[in-house]
Amino acid sequence: MKNILFLEQFSAISGGQVVLLQILDFLDKKEYKSFVILPGEGPLVEELDKRGIEHRAFPIGVYSVSKKSLFDMAKYFLLSLLLVPMTIIFMRRNKIDLVYANAPRTYFWGSAAALIAGKPVIWHVHSILSGSELLLSRLVMRYLNVRRAIAISKAVAKPFVEKDQTLAGKLIIVYNGVDHKKYLIGADVAEKYKKDLDIPADYKVINYIGQLARWKGVDDFLKAAVQLLRKKSDLRFQVIGEAIYGGRSEKEYEKKLKSIAAQNGQIQFLGKRSDIPELLSVTDILVVPSIEPEPLSLAMLEGMAAGKTVVAAAHGGPAEVIENKVSGILYPPGNIDALAEVLEHLLNDPAGCRSLGENARQAVARHYTQEIFIGNIRKIIDGII
């Protein structure tokens, strides 16, 4: 039995934490025992408890998820001076064989602790790093005991190697995967769900699913919705998600979004939901409107797995996964008029919409299933320990 220590920077659940839970669920329990270090109480702790996975709260602290200030960096280094010895002690007590750092805030102190303890490290990189965070990550990857850095897309891997190819040998791209069969829901269930949501049977449903964060471009989605609703009344737009990290700027942004939505009763905020497969079953078009490059987007893969037409900003991971006008539609990032135009064209072409959705479903079944993803992760872990 080998022991793996997973390091996580958030106790909330977003894309990176969903992927962590996938890995924990599918590691062979006869071969591996998992431990998790994370900041403290939250939805992720509840999920770990359900699975019977041992976890410990460390004082990882609150670190800005946007641009990092000098104060942020200074605080991070001071915390690292405490976290490195704490992690070494934990590793020795639990005979850890491998450290799996699942988030940027854990890379430095997790890798330093593993180096001192003489154990290998794997990074899982879920975001597109830049600035001082990228510079520090490059240095740590180069000089500490990092054996592999798993990037979830080429867009995530690119910043590490675009000015320095020496790190290319440690980087490996593994696209996320979804349980695609879970999203194949019958028409009878979808019809009932649409009725339960008080959506008229002949209405088309256009959705956004994900965090309510500025870089996600949710306000672009709503502005395009307002444009379309001036021309068509038989539409329902839904925003599914919440401001996960709860900072002041996110709360202000959420307030702004609700103000835009209040202009029209055909726009609904559904908040955080656990019934995403059912909500996708009544969806006609799923929009991924990020104004900054999206690392990948699990919601996009889920929508594709459900056989829905995905319209995404043409950058980051979505531009790698979607074959434009074959398995989805790509539009210029931040161009609200172009987004509204694409949506209007699709609404007027239901047959083309269905074809795009079916192609998307087949693409996920071939390349982006949970089984493919887990198989790739297992190979990496097995190859190291």
Image (cartoon, rainbow, N blue to C red):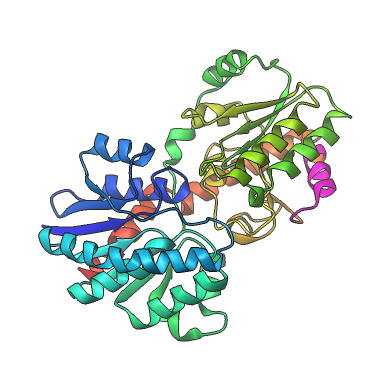
Picture residue at 26% right of the left edge, 64% below the top: 99
Q: Is 253 located above or below residue 320 in the figure?
A: above
Residue 236 coordinates in the image, percent (x, y): 72, 25
Residue 31 coordinates in the image, percent (x, y): 14, 55
Q: Is 372 located above or below residue 191 in the figure?
A: below
Q: Quadrant of the C terminus?
A: bottom left
- Whether the magenta-drawn stretch holds residue 335 is answered as yes
Task: Examine the rendering and report whether any part of residue 162 can be seen.
Answer: yes
Q: Is 177 located above or below residue 234 in the figure?
A: below
Q: Relative to the observer, which residue lies in front, 119 or 302?
A: 119
- Kindly indicate the quadrant of the structure image that contains residue 310: top right
- Kindly indicate the quadrant of the structure image that contains residue 116: bottom left
Prevailing SS of the magenta stretch: helix
Residue 133 coordinates in the image, percent (x, y): 50, 69
- Kindly indicate the quadrant of the structure image that contains residue 125: bottom left
Q: Quadrant of the N terminus?
A: bottom left
Q: Relative to the observer, which residue lies in front, 152 or 114?
A: 114
Magenta residues? 333-344
Residue 337 coordinates in the image, percent (x, y): 85, 47
Left-right relation of 220 to 328: right
Left-right relation of 313 to 342: left
Picture residue at 31% right of the left edge, 40% below the top: 45
Task: Examine the rendering and report whether any part of residue 320 can be seen.
Answer: no
Left-right relation of 197 to 170: right
Picture residue at 20% right of the left edge, 72% below the top: 119
- Whether the magenta-drawn stretch holds residue 114 is answered as no
